[in-house]
Image (cartoon, rainbow, N blue to C red):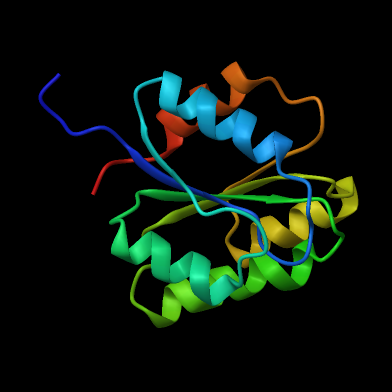
């Protein structure tokens, strides 16, 4: 394969301290041949965007369970646009009410995975919807 692997930053924005799901997704993406950077817990939107730009990421995967998804996802999108990095695909997962998903998509979140999404579905979606820079 001559093209470089997809680069994905997986991040846990906000004060949520549960990262098992993020680690499972990060491992699944890595096992599928992608380059993955996991930023760890308690990241600010600013830290996440900085990591995505520094790592030349093709996508950012946000994992959130705290209920602050509308604010935090919107801020990541806003900061990426402000840094002329709106081409970085933002997707996410966690505890997100179905009614909030259309609003997140309107903000620019490409896909929201809810609890129970299989890792092979997430990997397939990333492969089908994220292009290397």
Residue 60 x %, y %: 49, 52
Residue 36 as seen in the image, left or right of residue 3: right
Q: Residue at x 64, y 47 (%)?
A: 92
Q: Residue at x 40, y 57 (%)?
A: 88
Q: Residue furthest bottom?
A: 82
Q: Quadrant of residue 118?
A: top right
Q: Quadrant of residue 82?
A: bottom left
Q: Is residue 86 visible?
A: no
Q: Residue furthest left?
A: 2
Residue 95 as seen in the image, left or right of residue 39: right
Residue 33 x %, y %: 34, 23
Q: Is residue 45 visible?
A: yes
Q: Is residue 43 above or below residue 94?
A: below
Residue 122 as seen in the image, left or right of residue 85: right
Residue 8 x %, y %: 42, 44
Q: Residue at x 83, y 56 (%)?
A: 100
Q: Is residue 20 above or below residue 87?
A: above
Which is more toward the observer, 79 or 106? 79
Residue 1 x %, y %: 15, 18
Q: Residue at x 87, y 60 (%)?
A: 67
Residue 47 as seen in the image, left or right of residue 115: left
Which is more toward the observer, 133 or 51? 51
């Amino acid at each position: 394969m001559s093209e470089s692997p997809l680069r994905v930053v997986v991040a846990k924005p906000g004060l949520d301290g549960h990262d098992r799901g993020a680690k499972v997704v990060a491992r699944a993406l890595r096992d599928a041949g992608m380059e993955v950077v996991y930023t760890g817990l308690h990241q600010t939107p600013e830290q996440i965007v900085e990591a995505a730009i520094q790592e030349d990421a093709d996508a950012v995967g946000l994992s959130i369970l705290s209920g602050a998804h509308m604010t935090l996802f919107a801020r990541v999108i806003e900061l990426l646009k402000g840094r002329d990095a709106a081409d970085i695909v933002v997707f996410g997962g966690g505890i997100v009410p179905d009614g909030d998903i259309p609003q997140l998509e309107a903000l620019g979140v490409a896909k929201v995975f809810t609890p129970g999404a299989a890792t092979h579905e997430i990997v397939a979606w990333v492969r089908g919807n994220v292009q290397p820079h």
